[in-house]
């Protein structure tokens, strides 16, 4: 019983003997290695936002006609006046594209468009 205990104590002593010694000096930095081969292309990334905002500020002159691009659809249009804002209630289809207009009191129209 004493021999296994003695062996364990000797093994622990040998294992811990170098723990209090300081490490050596840091050597100079080596040269960079050769660049590796180019990897395969990754999968396509996620497309950008499918929703965008369009602002028109010519309301006094022509009612702020606001429309989205041909590959988009109009989600909402808000007529912003000096003291309030309301959804546009003047929607028309022009050349197959939905157009929102505001009254003469509006300062601008803020429309939200989404890709079809």
Image: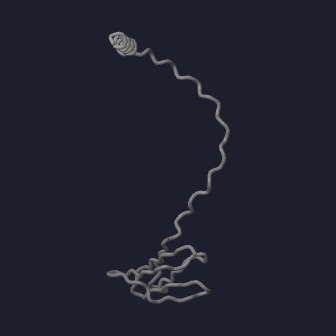
The residue shown at (62%, 51%) is 42
Q: Quadrant of residue 83?
A: bottom left
Q: Would residue 21 be visible to someone looking at this image?
A: no
Front residue of 42/20: it is: 20
Q: Would residue 78 be visible to someone looking at this image?
A: yes
Question: In what quadrant of the picture does the N terminus appear?
Answer: top left
Front residue of 30/90: it is: 30
| Vertical comparison of 6 with 89: above or below | above
| Relative side of 49 to 42, left or right | left
Please state the horizontal and vertical placement of residue 105, each as a whole percent of the image: 39, 86
Please state the horizontal and vertical placement of residue 34, each as a whole percent of the image: 65, 30
| Relative side of 102 to 6, left or right | right
Please state the horizontal and vertical placement of residue 47, each as a whole percent of the image: 57, 62
| Vertical comparison of 5 with 38: above or below | above
The residue shown at (47%, 89%) is 90
Question: In what quadrant of the picture does the C terminus appear?
Answer: bottom right
Please state the horizontal and vertical placement of residue 17, each as a whole percent of the image: 37, 12
């Amino acid at each position: 019983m004493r021999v296994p205990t003695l062996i364990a104590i000797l093994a622990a002593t040998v294992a811990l003997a170098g723990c209090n010694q300081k490490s050596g000096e840091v050597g100079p930095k080596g040269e960079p290695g050769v660049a590796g081969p180019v990897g395969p292309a990754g999968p396509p990334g996620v497309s950008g936002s499918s929703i965008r905002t369009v602002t028109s500020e010519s309301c006094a002159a022509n009612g702020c006609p606001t429309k989205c691009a041909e590959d988009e659809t109009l989600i909402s249009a808000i007529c912003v006046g000096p003291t309030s804002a309301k959804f546009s209630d003047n929607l028309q289809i022009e050349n197959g594209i939905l157009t929102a207009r505001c009254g003469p009191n509006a300062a601008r129209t803020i429309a939200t468009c989404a890709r079809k």
